[in-house]
Image (tube, coloured by chain):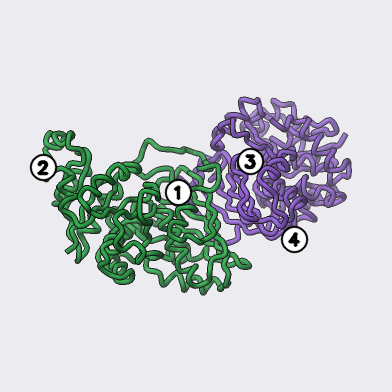
Chain colours: A green, B purple
C-alpha cells in the first residue's frame, strides 16, 4: 500500500484525500491544515488524521476541540509521497520540507513550472515523471486542454491550437471575488498562461490562448479551435473523443445547455460534491470547417485535477503504466457517466 | 434636407432619431411607436412628432395624455426614407407598408438577409446600396466585425477569421433575461449566425464564429483571431486601426479592464445614454503570433449601429460618398473620444 500524505485540505486537498482513500493500492496517512474551520471538522468526521501545517497555530485546533495527530513534519516523514494542495505559492515554500525528508512531492498547477522536475497530465505524459522528486499536476484548464489535445495530436497531428478560455470569476465559495455584470479580457495581453502551460506537457505544440473572466462560478468554458494536419470528419472526431475515459461527450438528448445543468446532472448522479472530473464536451458543438476543428467544453475547476493527482502518485513511484493507473483511479472514484 | 421617418422608438429607434435630428442635412419627420410608455413621453419631451404604429391602439396614447400626429402611414408617406427600428421580425411585416408608399426603408440586423436587396456597413460597402429599396443595417456584432475586418482585408488580405463572441445576456433594461451565473455555448452548434452575416458584407471572406452567452448586460466582448496573408507587426496593426474613426483603441494608461469602466468613461464624457458608438479595442491586446492577429474588442449592442443607420440614409439616396457621410455623421453626434 502506498502511503500518501495530503498537505493542504482546501478545495483540491479535500477532494484528493477522498480520492486517495478510495484507491485499493493507497492509504491516506493524513491531511495537514493551517487552521480549524468547517473543512477541518470534515476531515475529523471522515476519520482522517489531521496534522497542523503551522506548529504555532496548533493550539487553535485544541481550542476548537479538534484533535491533532502531530505537526506536518510527521505527516511528511510518514508518507511515501506527499500531495501538496496548498494555495498557490505556498507549495514553493514547502519544497524544502519535502526535500529534508526525502519525500517526493506533487504540487498543484498554481506553482511555477520552474519549481519542479516535470509537469504532469496522466493521459499525455504519465511515463515521463517516474522517479522525479518534484512534480506539478497542471491546472484545471491545462489539464482540460491536455486531455483533449493528446488524442487529437496522436491521431491527426495538430497544426495549431487557438483557444479562448471563458473563465469563472471564482469558485462558488469564493464570495469575495468578481467580476459582477462584466466580461473582462484577463489577461488583456496575449498569451494567457494556459498556452505556455500546455507546452510544459506538449513542448512542440503550437498553441495560442486568450483568457476572459465572467460573472459565473460553476465551471470554465472553452471555445476551442484546433487546426489539424490530417483532417477527419466531425463524426470521426466524435468517435475518437468518445473513447477517452476522461472526456464526457454531452449527448444532445440530455438537453444540457451550460454548467448549471451539468452540475445538476452530476448531483443527480450522486457525484461527491457534485464534482465533474471529466472534460464536458458538447457533442453537438464538434464541427469541422476546412481543416479547423471547433468545439465547446466545460471544465470543473474544483475537481478535474483530482484523478490526475491520484495517477501522479503511481507515475512518480513507478507503480503501474498509464492505462492501468487511469483505469484503477476511474473505477475507485466512479468516474464515467 | 432629407426627410427621415423612424418607425419604432425603442432601444435603437430612439437613438437613431436623436442622431438623425442632429444631422445638418436631415430632418426628422417623426417617430412611430406602438404604445405609450416612458419612451413615448421622451419623444414628446424631445419635440418629436409621434405617430401611432398600430391604429387601433391610438386611443391608448390619448388616455395617457400623449398627442399623436397621425397614423404610421402618414409618417411613411411624408418621409424620403424610413428607418425601421422595430423588434426582429416586425420589420418584415412592415415591408408592404413601405412598398405601398414607394418609400425606401432601412431595417435592422434582426431581420433576415433575404428580406432586403442589400446589407450595409458604412466602412465596408457604402457604395453598393445606392438606389436600393430595402437595405438591412447589419447587427451590432456584425457591424463591429465588419469595421475591424475592412481595413485588415484591404491592407493585409485575410486568410481566415475565427471569432468567439462572448455575448451579453440582455440589455440593462431587459430584466427578464438570463443567464445568471452561467456561461452558455449559444448556439452550441457551429457556426453562430455572425459569420454568415459578415458574409453578407464580405461575400468572399473566410470566417468561423462561435457564440456564448454570459451574465453581463453592458456590452458584447469579442475574442478575435484573424490569420493574415501579408503579416504585419503588432505596431503596424495598431497604427492601421488607430486611423479608423469608428475604432476606439483603449489606451493602456486609461486602465479600462472591461465594459463597466468603458461605460463609466463614456458617461464621464457626456455621451448621450452613455453610448459607445465605436468598437472599443484593447490596444494592449493587439498581438501577432506567426501569421495570426489576436485582439479583444467590446461592442456596445445598443448604439454601435446608430451612426451606421445615419450613413445608410445617405448611401441609399446617393447623397454623398462614404468618407463624407461618415465624417459628417461623426461630427454631428460627437463620435470619437
**Label at residue B204:** 4
Task: Give coordinates of residue B283: x percent, y percent.
Answer: 63, 39
Residue on which the image places disc 2: A67
* Mark 3 or mark 4, earlier in chain: 4
The residue that mark 1 highlights is B182
The answer to whether residue B88 of the structure is visible from this angle is yes
Q: Which residue is mark 3?
A: B281
Q: Earlier in the sequence, mark 1 or mark 3?
A: 1
Tags 1 and 2 touching, CB below 8 Å: no
Q: Chain of mark 2?
A: A
Q: Is residue A321 left or right of residue B200?
A: left
- Label 2 secondary element: loop
User: Which quadrant is home to the N terminus of chain B?
Assistant: top right
Residue B133 in picture, x, y percent from top left: 83, 51
Quadrant of the rendering where the C terminus of chain B is positioned? top right
The numbered mark, 1 or 4, whose residue comes first in the sequence reads: 1
Residue B49 drawn at (x, y percent): 76, 31
Same-chain check, marks 3 and 2? no
Q: Is disc 1 placed on a helix, strand or loop?
A: loop
Amino acid at each position: 500500500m502506498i502511503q500518501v500524505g495530503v498537505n493542504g485540505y482546501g478545495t483540491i486537498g479535500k477532494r484528493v484525500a477522498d480520492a486517495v482513500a478510495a484507491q485499493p493500492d493507497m492509504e491516506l496517512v493524513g491531511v495537514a491544515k493551517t487552521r480549524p474551520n468547517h473543512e477541518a471538522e470534515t476531515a475529523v468526521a471522515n476519520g482522517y488524521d489531521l496534522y497542523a501545517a503551522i506548529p504555532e497555530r496548533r493550539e487553535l485546533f485544541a481550542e476548537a476541540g479538534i484533535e491533532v495527530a502531530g505537526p506536518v513534519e510527521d505527516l511528511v516523514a510518514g508518507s511515501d509521497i506527499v500531495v501538496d494542495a496548498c494555495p498557490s505559492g505556498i507549495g514553493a515554500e514547502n519544497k524544502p520540507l519535502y526535500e529534508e525528508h526525502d519525500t517526493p512531492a506533487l504540487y498543484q498547477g498554481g506553482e511555477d513550472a520552474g519549481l519542479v522536475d516535470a509537469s504532469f497530465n496522466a493521459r499525455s505524459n504519465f511515463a515521463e515523471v517516474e522517479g522525479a522528486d518534484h512534480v506539478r499536476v497542471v491546472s484545471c484548464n491545462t489539464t482540460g486542454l491536455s486531455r483533449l489535445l493528446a488524442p487529437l495530436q496522436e491521431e491527426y497531428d495538430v497544426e495549431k491550437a487557438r483557444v479562448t478560455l471563458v473563465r469563472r470569476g471564482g469558485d462558488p465559495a469564493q464570495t469575495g471575488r468578481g467580476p459582477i455584470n462584466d466580461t473582462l479580457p484577463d489577461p488583456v495581453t496575449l498569451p494567457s498562461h494556459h498556452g505556455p502551460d500546455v507546452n510544459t506537457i506538449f513542448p512542440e505544440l503550437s498553441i495560442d490562448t486568450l483568457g476572459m473572466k465572467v460573472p459565473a462560478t460553476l465551471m470554465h468554458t472553452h471555445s476551442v479551435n484546433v487546426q489539424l494536419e490530417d483532417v477527419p470528419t466531425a463524426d470521426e472526431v466524435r468517435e475518437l473523443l468518445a473513447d477517452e475515459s476522461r472526456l464526457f461527450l454531452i449527448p444532445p438528448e440530455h438537453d444540457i445547455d451550460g454548467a448549471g445543468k451539468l452540475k445538476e446532472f452530476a448531483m443527480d448522479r450522486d457525484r461527491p460534491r457534485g464534482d465533474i472530473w471529466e472534460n464536458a464536451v458538447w457533442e453537438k458543438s464538434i464541427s469541422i470547417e476546412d481543416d479547423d476543428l471547433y468545439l465547446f467544453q466545460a471544465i470543473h475547476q474544483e475537481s478535474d485535477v483530482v484523478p490526475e493527482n491520484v495517477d501522479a502518485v503511481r507515475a512518480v513511484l513507478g507503480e503501474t503504466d498509464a492505462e492501468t493507473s487511469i483505469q484503477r483511479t476511474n473505477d475507485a472514484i466512479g468516474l464515467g457517466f
